[in-house]
Image: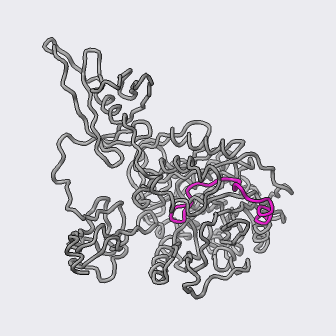
């Protein structure tokens, strides 16, 4: 059997990744897209594209019936599920096969056995908790279907369990169409380690080494690497054996991942993902393979070699998200003006300059992967590439990634899943470049200098204001007969044009690349916002105003909450759903809810006024107590 046309039942970076391998193999490609994704990169690069009417995942990418019809209509003879949405849905796999199409994935029976994490655990001899007591804490609430951290909550107080179960069910139902959740023990200080497997229809199963995915936010992976550092040889062999055992137990075919929580020399089975993982490029780099190409070969009936290739070197991957880690990882939307990385690293993305990052889907922009002979070299190469990358658009986690890769706990290989719980504040502390505002002002002023015969005295300093790292900064410069000059003796302007500024400080020259998009200015990796000369009084908000941090939908308001209610600082007031995740909006201070403008089901834009909390004076609060 030879596959000629593949439809990818997914979107964004995932679809673009599969299309790239298909194009190299001479296989035609078909994309599906929602109305929100009509102009998306994956829809543009495919040989053909089919519209799925609607914008939400439930209307579009989770509609297996529409996707199968699209494949038939476009003349595809195979469907690749990508890694998300329906990739672990046994009914979808059966529908593809029933339509006479090739399914580039595991048998539906294997998906069924492992797609539910509760069934998978029982298959591996592990039982979820049926009742939770104080002695069991902390525990982890987890969605039985799907992955990516959605529908997952850590519970450390028994009193919080019911509320977290409800929130996890709602999030899981929204993301996967299945609200089943379960509870398991949570191992504090553990590392998230997984094994990549690949199996053919001839009985061969490869275990392609380990990956460490311990650096996570909200149980979603941020930085991954292969092989997992510092594991004893005996533990590596044990993990490989358990992964192969899991694959053989369900007659697995294709690419999959078996995940564990590791503490010391102990390993706790978590789940088996019956699909390709987002972090698969690090395994590809280390083993010198193309896992998507091997998936296609297996689906065509070809056999794997009896033994996998030998590993070589070390690889590290960082996920670049449109989000603000300093503001509870709030996802960001808007226009991505530019996204480029230096040569020597791999960039997997579903965006190009000018694309819009919307509210309906995951906020991941790209994956950046570095491979080198040693772990230290790979980590250094990736950190340097991210630092030099041009990421112009909404706020991203780029600075967090660079600092994480250079953190002593990570470079020494001593990290665990609590890394960001311990270090988030220091990793997100502002560290603005003090010369960035001056470079931005000089580039903006280039070409505006005008002199006449009347100008005999030194010019007055010009002042421009910028918002940088949440604070206002002034840049002062002068127009002179020799050109533009800094209004300070410590800085000499060596060169200025609209895109490049060279400043000399204490005999050391620094070069700044400047890019401008309206009021947004980028000086190297530093983002600034040019402020108006006279602020708009209408832009001021009353103290205690709660503004929507992102566009989204109000899904819940705290029970019994109404204007006039007393609230305490940190108390959850309402929840927004955006980019497939729920985001809690809490009271900023202790006081009175003087206004509530949000209601369940309401669509809000970023900056929309949701509520106002009027702070209670300390003396009054003490009297109430």
Q: Residue at x 75, y 71 (%)?
A: 246
Q: Please state the horizontal and vertical placement of residue 117, each as a whole percent of the image.
A: 63, 76
What segment carries the magenta color?
216-240
- Above or below — where is 488 with respect to 328? above
Identify which residue, 543 or 40, lies in the foreground: 543
Identify which residue, 227 or 16, lies in the foreground: 227
Residue at the extreme right of the image, as rendered: 306
Identify which residue, 491 or 81, lies in the foreground: 491
Taking the image as shown, residue 404 lies to the left or right of residue 272, namely left
Q: Is residue 62 magenta?
A: no
Residue at the extreme top of the image, as rendered: 453
Please indicate, yes or no, whether residue 81 appears anywhere in the rendered image: yes
Q: Please state the horizontal and vertical placement of residue 236, each as a whole percent of the image.
A: 77, 61
Q: Is residue 231 magenta?
A: yes
Screen quadrant of the C terminus: bottom left
Q: Residue at x 39, y 26 (%)?
A: 503
- Above or below — where is 118 with respect to 570? below
Please indicate, yes or no, whether residue 102 appears anywhere in the rendered image: no
Screen quadrant of the N terminus: bottom right
- Above or below — where is 503 with respect to 623? above
Identify which residue, 440 or 473, lies in the foreground: 473
Q: Please state the horizontal and vertical placement of residue 516, each as a whole percent of the image.
A: 35, 37
Q: Residue at x 44, y 28 (%)?
A: 511
Q: Residue at x 69, y 56 (%)?
A: 228
């Amino acid at each position: 059997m030879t596959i000629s046309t593949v439809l990818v039942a997914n979107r964004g970076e995932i679809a673009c990744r599969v299309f790239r391998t298909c194009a190299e193999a001479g296989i035609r490609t078909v994309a599906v897209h929602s109305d929100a994704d009509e102009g998306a990169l994956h829809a543009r690069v495919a040989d053909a594209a089919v519209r799925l009417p609607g914008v939400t995942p439930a209307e579009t990418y989770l509609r297996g019936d529409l996707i199968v019809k699209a494949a038939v209509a476009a003349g595809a003879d195979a469907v690749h599920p990508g890694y998300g949405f329906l990739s672990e849905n046994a009914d979808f796999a059966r529908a593809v096969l029933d339509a006479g199409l090739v399914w580039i994935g595991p048998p539906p029976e294997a998906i069924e056995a492992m797609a539910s994490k509760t069934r998978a655990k029982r298959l591996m001899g592990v039982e979820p908790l049926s009742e939770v007591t104080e002695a069991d804490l902390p525990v982890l609430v987890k969605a039985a279907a799907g992955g990516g951290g959605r529908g997952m909550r850590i519970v450390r107080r028994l009193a919080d369990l019911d509320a977290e179960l409800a929130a996890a069910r709602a999030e899981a139902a929204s993301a996967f169409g299945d609200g089943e959740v379960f509870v398991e023990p949570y191992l504090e200080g553990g590392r998230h380690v997984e094994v990549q497997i690949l199996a053919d229809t001839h009985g061969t199963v490869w275990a392609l080494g380990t990956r460490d995915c311990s650096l996570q936010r909200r149980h979603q992976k941020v930085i991954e690497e292969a092989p997992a550092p510092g594991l004893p040889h005996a533990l590596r062999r044990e993990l490989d054996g358990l992964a192969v055992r899991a694959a053989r137990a369900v007659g697995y075919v294709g690419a999959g991942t078996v995940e564990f929580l590791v503490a010391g020399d102990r390993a706790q089975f978590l789940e088996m993902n019956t699909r390709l993982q987002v972090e698969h490029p690090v395994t590809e780099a280390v083993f010198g393979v193309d896992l998507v190409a091997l998936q296609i070969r297996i689906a065509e009936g070809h056999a794997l070699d009896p033994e996998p290739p030998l590993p070589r070197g070390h690889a590290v991957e960082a996920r670049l998200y449109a989000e603000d880690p300093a503001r509870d990882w709030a996802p960001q939307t808007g226009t991505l003006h530019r996204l480029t990385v230096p040569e020597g690293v791999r960039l997997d993305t579903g965006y190009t300059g000018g694309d819009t990052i919307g509210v309906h889907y995951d906020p991941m922009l790209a994956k950046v992967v570095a491979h080198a002979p040693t772990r230290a070299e790979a980590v250094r190469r990736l950190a340097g590439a991210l630092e030099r990358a041009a990421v112009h658009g909404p706020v991203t986690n780029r600075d967090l990634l660079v600092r994480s890769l250079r953190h002593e706990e990570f470079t020494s290989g001593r990290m665990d899943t609590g890394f960001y719980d311990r270090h988030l504040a220091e990793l997100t502390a502002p560290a603005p470049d003090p010369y960035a505002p001056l470079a931005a002002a000089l580039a903006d002023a280039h070409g505006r200098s005008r002199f006449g015969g009347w100008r005999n005295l030194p010019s007055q300093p010009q002042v421009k204001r910028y918002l940088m790292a949440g604070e206002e900064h002034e840049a002062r410069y002068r127009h002179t007969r020799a050109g533009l000059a800094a209004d300070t003796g410590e800085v000499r302007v060596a060169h200025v044009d609209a895109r490049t500024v060279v400043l000399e400080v204490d005999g050391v020259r620094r070069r700044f690349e400047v890019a401008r998009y309206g009021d947004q200015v980028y000086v190297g990796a530093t983002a600034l916002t040019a402020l108006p000369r006279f602020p708009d009084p209408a832009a001021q908000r009353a103290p205690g105003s709660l503004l929507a941090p992102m566009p989204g939908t109000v899904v819940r308001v705290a029970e019994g909450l109404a204007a006039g209610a007393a609230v305490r600082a940190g108390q959850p007031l309402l929840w927004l759903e955006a980019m497939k995740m729920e985001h809690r909006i809490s009271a900023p201070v202790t006081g009175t809810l003087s206004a509530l403008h949000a209601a369940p089901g309401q669509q809000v834009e970023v900056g929309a006024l949701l509520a106002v909390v009027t702070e209670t004076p300390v003396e009054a609060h003490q009297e109430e107590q």
